[in-house]
Image (cartoon, rainbow, N blue to C red):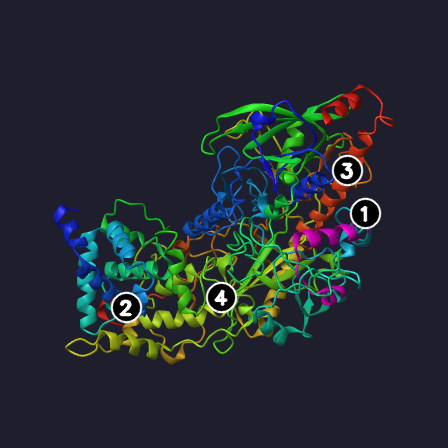
Amino acid sequence: MSVHTTGAAVDGRHYDAIVVGSGWAGSLVARHLGRKNWRVLVLEAGNGGTDNWVDYQDSVRTFSSAVAKVPNSAYRPNRAAPSPDVLDLSPGGPGNPDGYRATGHFLQTGPLPYGTDYLRALGGAGMHWLGAVPRMFPEDFSTRTAYHYGLDWPLGAADLEQHLRDAEHLLGTAGESREQHRLGTVPADHEYPMEQIPPSYQDKVFHKKLDTRTVVDKVAGNREYRLQVYGLPQARNSTPNAAYPTADGSTYKPRGAVGVPNFGERCVGNASCVPVCPVQAKSSPLRLQQDFTGTVEIATRCVVSRVLPGRGNTVRGVEFREYGDPATPASRAYRAEADVVVLAAHAIENAVLLLASHMANSSGNVGKHLMDHPTLLAWAETPPEMPVGPYRGPGHTSGLECFRTAEGRRQRAPFRVEIGNWGWGWATGAPMSSVSGMLGLGGDSDGEVNPDGRYGPALRSALGSHLNRQVQLQIAVEQHADPANRVTIDPSRHRDAMGNPRPIIHYDLAKHVRDGMYAARLAALEIFKLLGATDRSSYGAQADGSYPLGHYRHSPDGVLEELDLVYHGAGHGAGTHVMGAERATSVVDTYQRTHDHPNLFAVGCGSMPSVGTSNPTLTMAALALRSAERIHRDLAELHQPVTVAGPRAARTQEVAQ
Amino acid sequence: MTDHEAAAHSAGPAPLDRFVRLCVPLTGFTAYELRSTGMAQLYFDTAGREIGHRSLDAFLGVWEEAHQGGLGPSRLPALERELARALIYLWYTGAFPRIAPAAHAELRRDRPNQEFVASPESYPEGLVWRAFGGHPAGAKPPGFGTWGDEPPVLPTEAELAARIAAEDAGPGGAVAYDAGSYGSAGESGGSTPAHLLPGPRSSRAVSPSAVPPASSHPVRETSPEAGE
């Protein structure tokens, strides 16, 4: 059980470690250090209160009440610690095809919008994530060497193997190891704790229609790709895998809801993983926080404003502001000290904190290399005799993996084709917008009442048939590290209500990425053709002359026809304090320790030099566990007075007793 | 609203009964199905508040007359047609929609023309989920692995029409279902016409009822009031 405290109560106190942020990375680090008996303070900027059953239900109700059921729609807005929201962006309007307008937490200055959100609340974006945990391919760690783009990692997949397994255990993952081994993402002896989440009915239709068929990629030199549908590893409770090895030889026991025993131990198909799993069968950081020992304290509503410098190049602790009411920014400033400070506040917030503290930036790379998985949505209608039954089960349970690896990457960014289980929801707002569309509701572009529509039995029957035939592909394209995509701050001009600097985002898609998205669009058309489905995707000018947010036109070589394309943010912010062997070109080392400050760590997706085509949480979790072990060793060394001399060590020793 | 109107609006079960009865042919769901959502009173109150109790009452009168005359909603005048759509949207999604600006103006509403969810309880009661044999996202979960099952066989339009006609049978017998004036595509209904499908949401901030159709409605030779 975690111990809750307040900012006022911890003011001036000294800890072994301070962890900034209570999402996946912060919770993994704090959990590990607590179990090693270190005294840890976790400072969470956002609200707490979801870590008991009754208050968790408030999130479910908030979701039910929301008109736009976006990733942050289950969580209350918070002025004191604002979160970016996908609702903050709107298109540029007629005559401004690639333009956009941005409000909210981010100030955006780039040619294209950064359409990704995160959540500042207990558990962080780990509350609204989908729960997809595919591993990165070994080749994803060295795209610079192998394919001449992006940045290489200073370590490889093999170096992370044990930590990946530990992360898969702690997150509680379900998957089919044999299949993933064939794909090339896990070793032969690998097992997931739980059996694969059953595929959706739609997945089976795709298997039947697509497996062994081929698609030619005109962008990648007319290379032929053989389609094969693969299951998706997920951090979602399923049937325990009897073959999974546990320490004491017992069968793995799924972990369910926080605060209710024996509940949520299997997914029951609420089909709302993003933004909230009502039964908590989807894993969240709240689970890890239940494991916190008594030496770990959490203080919510405490916004860290800067890291405090210590002697030499060390850091001493953090300064933070505690607020009582999320609706008002009234707050008090406090300080806490620690031997080790771990920033785990999300890639973008970590960068803001480092920049605001004037720390860890001797390379000039803090904030640079901002990444995401720009995602192309393609949607289609299957024939009446071939319903796929969407809006059931987890958000996606299978995908097409063939475009993710190998030589094609040299010519265009690789991409992963997710087979969406929730109809046209993301692209069009269905099934609600399908109701208004079928009714002819809302008027024409002049605001006049529309003539056509279906009503009564005709409506119910047409909607029933049509909604069961909605197919949506969500194609996540790799975005490589590009120094021009970056987070900066301008504290003299742009601060949030509490006075902390707002992230200023400059974002664009490089040609390699645009080429990948172009290839993804052509692949989607081929897939729809093989399915016998009618493509309904639309990326160009709409009836009122405006273009969808994230629009651009592109031809990879000037010879292929120029196409309208639209990308969406995937919520996979990464790369703002990249890891590297050279301190001149990177911010952290392989343990996510900042090169400049031996006791300051920046953990999370911000450390990743590349993201491949995999949802990044699992890799981030493995990195966090690797860091936690390193921090434990550092603290152990610090607390051996024989080997560590000097006044600082002596003082630390006194406090520890 | 005057006190008298408010009293008339909320006087006992009769107005609510009438509201539900007239929503049966609009939605294609039986009175029992509508009542079993538990939302009838909330929707009656919400609609009255949104479009004005007097306008709602006038609409119900016009619709009742058309329905008794064997005509479907597509034969209604423009304003009433849009109000029929708004009520159906409320039943199908639990949210009151953004309506055509022309209708909004004609009603002289004092409320913003913006979609909102009537209550956290109404969202999972939306009929749209039942229309395709599904369940609302985030509620009424059907159980582990059920998403791998074949989607259910749904009742045909004729079966649905027969079901509600049986319920409707008054002293003068059941009102015959005039499929054309309900916008039916008849037997040819395979691929849905683009103007009845949603287009892309230009941003996530656009509410579902404000998403424009995938293409403009075809221009009509004659006004729909005059028949198709």
User: Given the image, on which type of amino acid does mark 1 rest?
Assistant: Leu
Q: Do the residues at pointers 4 and 1 share their chain? A: no
**What is the C-alpha distance between the residues marked 4 and 2?**
25 Å
User: In the drawing, does residue A359 fall left or right of residue B96?
Assistant: right
Residue A462 percent across, percent down from the top left: 39, 71
Residue position marked by numbered label 1 in the rendering:
A155
Disc 3: host chain: A
Residue A394 percent across, percent down from the top left: 56, 61
Identify the magenta region.
A159-181
Q: Quadrant of the C terminus of chain A?
A: top right
Tell me the mark number nearer the camera, choosing from 4 and 1. Answer: 4
User: Given the image, on which type of amino acid does mark 4 rest?
Assistant: Pro
Q: Is residue A545 magenta?
A: no
Along the line of sight, the residue nearer the viewer: A114 or A519? A114
Tell me the mark number nearer the camera, choosing from 2 and 1. Answer: 2
**What is the C-alpha distance between the residues marked 4 and 1?**
44 Å
Residue farthest to the right? Answer: A643
